[in-house]
Image (cartoon, grey):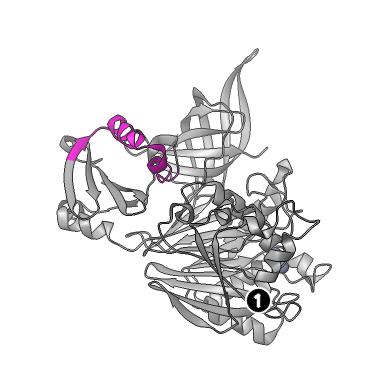
């Protein structure tokens, strides 16, 4: 059986659709949807996939935008496979209710590029906006980590808890380098007076008291910005923190730790009821005290986001002293402190997608669970069955055409084993394709796709290299739908 949980939220009400798909039991090959309108109302009905899509599209735009990812197949899944029939049978009302109340945290990557934004086409897959992450804790608290150019996109989402006034927003700023603050003047929710933000950062010895407040004023001073501070009408509260602090926000415990970076930088750890997220960007190993500070911060983290700007070779030579790490440093720390999933972050502006692919491949050879931070990527934490699950954004914007090409595919499964299989390409655009497979390839891994295409001299073989961006339940039994973006 496959269980999908779709959560649709708005300020004072959350709607949860629990979709149960029974694959093995023929008589139950239907989708049973339980719909929870806050805890008071509860009802169940059978529904087809098409009707489910209709149901979701019936919500007004405001609600629909909460369905994540928006549009495409109208299905956001915090999904998990239940292996045994026994488990299927015991998943009655009480079980369903229990699963839905499991604490789940959602971490979204709005900006992952270090130093300066990139817009060149060779960097589009991982993305060009500078650091900005959003963590929605199980209690609804919204955390924003850093205010790089990715913050603008977060603010434009329109359904941000910040603009809806649903819950508090707490913004942690690691340090004051351009790439971590540049999104502030472009964050639309700061210009709405009903909004309230809590900012946390450290007192810089170069700025003194109210360092972040001064950064705001300096960024918007003449002649650097056309609008002055008076336009920024949202309530802003600034709190000074320093390395080693711990405090609670809602159900979540925050810990800070100093990192090794020119003019200083703070790492943040957020322990939520769903698990611990550690954000440690802009850090160079080699200072014993600060290396220890990072290890204490990252100990046992479920998600450890670490600076991986350079290759180990660059870091050993020309880039030493610039305040950054390599993928290898992240792997070492993750292994030492028992972090479960490592996310390589702060990609160098000169690292093309192919270079980041290579960095990710090297890291995966050394550590089991690694992702390369990618703009639009969402990682959920705490879902039953799978503690950490990553989702990639829709990456193909070009027109897609339904297709029926026979193809041969080689790749690597989630468990790291090589596989080959013959299949059919279901839809095709210049950027990528949707392929049905029996094997589950690893997200962000490479697939070799060899397609048969009719040519003037009979059938020709077209060889393409694909990068896995999407893994979905397939239309047919035992099949999954795999979305790839062609990389050359
Ligand atoms: Zn940076
Ligand atoms: Zn920096």
Q: Camera-side residue: 379 or 486?
A: 379
Position of the C terminus, as image quadrant, is top right
Question: How far across and how far down the image is residue 11, in percent?
Answer: 36, 53
Question: How far across and how far down the image is residue 460, in percent?
Answer: 62, 22
Q: Residue furthest right?
A: 318
The magenta stretch spans residue 62: yes
Q: Is residue 200 above or below residue 122?
A: below
The magenta stretch spans residue 93: no
Q: Is residue 241 above or below residue 43?
A: below
Q: Is residue 486 above or below residue 14?
A: above
Q: Residue at x 71, y 41 (%)?
A: 121
Snapshot quadrant of residue 305? bottom right
Relative placement, left or right, of 379 versus 240 is: left
Ligand 1 location (quadrant): bottom right
Q: Residue at x 68, y 64 (%)?
A: 216
Question: How far across and how far down the image is residue 486, in percent?
Answer: 61, 37
Pointer 1: what residue? 210
Q: Camera-side residue: 415 or 373?
A: 373
Where disc 1 sits, the SS reads: loop
Relative placement, left or right, of 462 versus 298 is: right
Magenta segment: 45-69
Q: Camera-side residue: 300 or 281?
A: 281
Q: Residue furthest front?
A: 230
Q: Residue at x 34, y 49 (%)?
A: 7
């Amino acid at each position: 059986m496959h269980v999908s949980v779709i959560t649709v939220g708005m300020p004072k009400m959350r709607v949860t659709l629990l979709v149960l798909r029974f694959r093995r039991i023929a008589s139950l090959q239907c989708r049973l949807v339980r719909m929870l309108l806050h805890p008071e109302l509860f009802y169940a009905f059978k529904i087809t996939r098409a009707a489910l899509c209709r149901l979701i599209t019936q919500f007004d735009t405001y609600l629909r935008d909460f369905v994540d990812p928006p549009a495409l197949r109208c299905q956001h899944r915090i999904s998990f496979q239940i292996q045994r029939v026994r488990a299927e049978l015991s998943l009655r009302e009480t079980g369903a209710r229990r699963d839905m109340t499991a604490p789940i945290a959602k971490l979204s990557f709005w900006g992952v590029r270090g130093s300066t934004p990139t817009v060149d086409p060779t960097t589009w897959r991982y993305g060009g906006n500078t650091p900005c992450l959003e963590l929605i804790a199980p209690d609804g608290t919204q955390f924003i980590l850093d205010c790089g150019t990715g913050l603008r996109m977060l603010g434009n989402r329109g359904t941000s808890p910040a603009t809806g006034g649903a819950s508090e927003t707490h913004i942690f700023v690691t340090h004051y380098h351009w790439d971590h603050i540049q999104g502030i003047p472009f964050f639309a929710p700061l210009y709405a007076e009903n909004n309230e933000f809590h900012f946390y950062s450290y007192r810089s010895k170069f700025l003194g008291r109210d360092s972040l407040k001064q950064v705001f004023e300096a960024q918007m001073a003449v002649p650097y910005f056309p609008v002055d501070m008076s336009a920024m009408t949202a309530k802003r509260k600034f709190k000074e923190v320093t390395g080693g602090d711990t405090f609670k926000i809602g159900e979540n415990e925050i810990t800070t730790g100093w990192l090794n970076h020119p003019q200083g930088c703070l790492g943040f750890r957020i322990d939520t009821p769903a698990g611990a997220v550690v954000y440690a960007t802009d850090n160079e190993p080699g200072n014993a005290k600060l290396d220890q500070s990072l290890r204490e911060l990252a100990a046992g983290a479920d998600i450890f986001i670490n600076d991986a700007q350079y290759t180990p070779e660059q870091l050993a030579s020309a880039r030493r002293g610039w305040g950054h790490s390599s993928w290898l440093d992240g792997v070492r720390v993750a292994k030492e402190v028992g972090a479960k999933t490592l996310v390589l972050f702060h990609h160098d502006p000169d690292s093309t997608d192919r270079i980041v692919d290579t960095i990710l491949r090297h890291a995966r050879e050394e550590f089991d669970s690694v992702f390369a931070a990618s703009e639009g990527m969402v990682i959920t934490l705490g879902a039953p069955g799978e503690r950490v699950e990553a989702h990639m954004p829709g990456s193909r914007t070009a027109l897609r055409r339904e297709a029926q090409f026979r193809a041969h595919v080689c790749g690597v499964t989630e468990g790291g084993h090589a596989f080959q299989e013959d299949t059919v390409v279901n839809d095709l655009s210049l950027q990528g394709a949707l392929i049905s497979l029996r094997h589950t390839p690893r997200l962000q891994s490479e697939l070799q796709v060899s397609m048969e295409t009719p040519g003037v001299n009979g059938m020709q073989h077209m060889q393409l290299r694909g990068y896995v961006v999407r893994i979905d339940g397939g239309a047919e039994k035992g099949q999954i739908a795999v979305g790839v973006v062609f990389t050359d």
